[in-house]
Amino acid sequence: MLQQAQTATADALVKDTTTQTFVKDVIEDSKRQPVLVDFWAPWCGPCKQLTPVLEKAVRAAKGKVKLVKMNIDDHPAIPGQLGIQSIPAVIAFVNGQPADGFMGALPESQVVAFLERLTKGSIDGEAMDLIKAADAALAGGDPAGAANLYAELLAEDNGNVHALAGLARCYVETDALDQARQTLALVPDSKRNESSVAAARAALELAEQAKKIGPIAELERKVAADPLDHQARFDLALALNGKGRRLEALDHLIGIVRRDRKWNDDGARKQLVQLFDAWGPTDEATIEGRKRLSSILFA
């Protein structure tokens, strides 16, 4: 009987989910303990390597974390909303919200390290509150306040990757690009694929591109004079994004894709994907942009 109970407990830690059951299996359950979501597909070779590693590591954690698997071919809506671009992709949910993640088939040692950090963080309620407050301050346009909170987190744990990435984003927002670059350099190589780090790196690259572009007014004159000057429109989009005018940047890049999908080796669409990475999957501009881009590409 004891062995049967142990087997049932282990099996309860790993399950499949659907679009209909995602809220119960992930959002609600993550309010009790962290839940990993493994986005996979039957045709994905690296997925077949990663999933058994995840299952083994989760079962070894003995209830500190659960694993939920979602086949993106059968259930594309949720991964689409979260901005999943490639698989395998693993997103960790804590207290009903995406908290961390990584892409690619990591080796077992890195998966175990990821779970250890995740479960350690989930126990520390004060640190989780600080992360939420820092993220909210950054999203609300207060990079200085957010930087203070991220610095407080790093004073307690200088290896907190989410705090390092957040601090780098704060530097980007205040145009301190050298400091942003130095902060990202502190992230270990094994953690550079985590979602928060990838977003910070994308934001830095976009800011560096924007600094090389001419004044917005001059670019606007070029576009007004020749609406088919895609390079001027592309540069204008980057410049507008650098000033926080995301929806305007989105309009111009979508305009290029609509007029000429193949321009500059699919450059406008690729730039949109980088913007979505930098803005984050829940940002208003990302959600709107993905809808509009899909309506063009799959029309």
Image: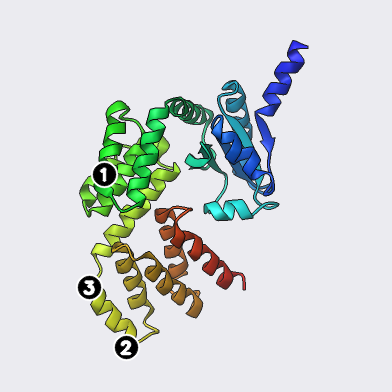
Crowd class of label 1 (few under 14; some 14 to 19; many from 20; radius 10 Å): some
In whole angstroms, how far apart are the C-alphas of marks 3 and 1?
29 Å
Q: Nearer the viewer, residue 269 or 61?
A: 61
Between residues 278 and 145, which one lies in front from this camera angle? Answer: 145
Residue type at tag 1: Gly
> Would you identify the image quadrant in which residue 4 lies?
top right
Q: Residue at x 33, y 85 (%)?
A: 224
**Residue 264 in the image: x percent, y percent?**
42, 72
Q: Which comes before the other along the chain, label 3 or label 2?
A: 3
Which three-letter amino acid code belongs to the residue tagged 2? Ala
Of the numbered discs in the image, which one, if any, rests on residue 42? none
- Local packing at callout 3 (Cα closer than 10 Å; few below 14, some 14-19, many 20+) is some
Q: Which residue is mark 1?
A: 145
As helix, strand or loop, the secondary structure at mark 3 comes to loop
Q: At which x and y percent is residue 22? A: 64, 44
Circle on res. 215: 3
Residue at image coords 26%, 44%: 145
Q: Position of residue 101 (x, y in %)?
A: 49, 40
Q: Secondary structure at mark 2?
A: helix
Left or right position of 171 against 28: left
**Residue under label 2:** 225
- Does label 2 or label 1 sit earlier along the sequence? 1
Residue at point 41%, 33% (across, down): 128
Residue at the bottom extreme of this rendering: 225
Quadrant occupied by the C terminus: bottom right
Determine contact: label 3, label 1, CB under 8 Å. no
Q: Using the numbered discs, state the Cα–Cα distance from disc 2 to disc 1 in whole angstroms.
A: 42 Å
> Contact (CB < 8 A) between labels 3 and 2?
no
Q: Position of residue 182 (x, y in %)?
A: 24, 43
Looking at numbered disc 3 in the image, what kind of residue is underneath it?
Answer: Pro
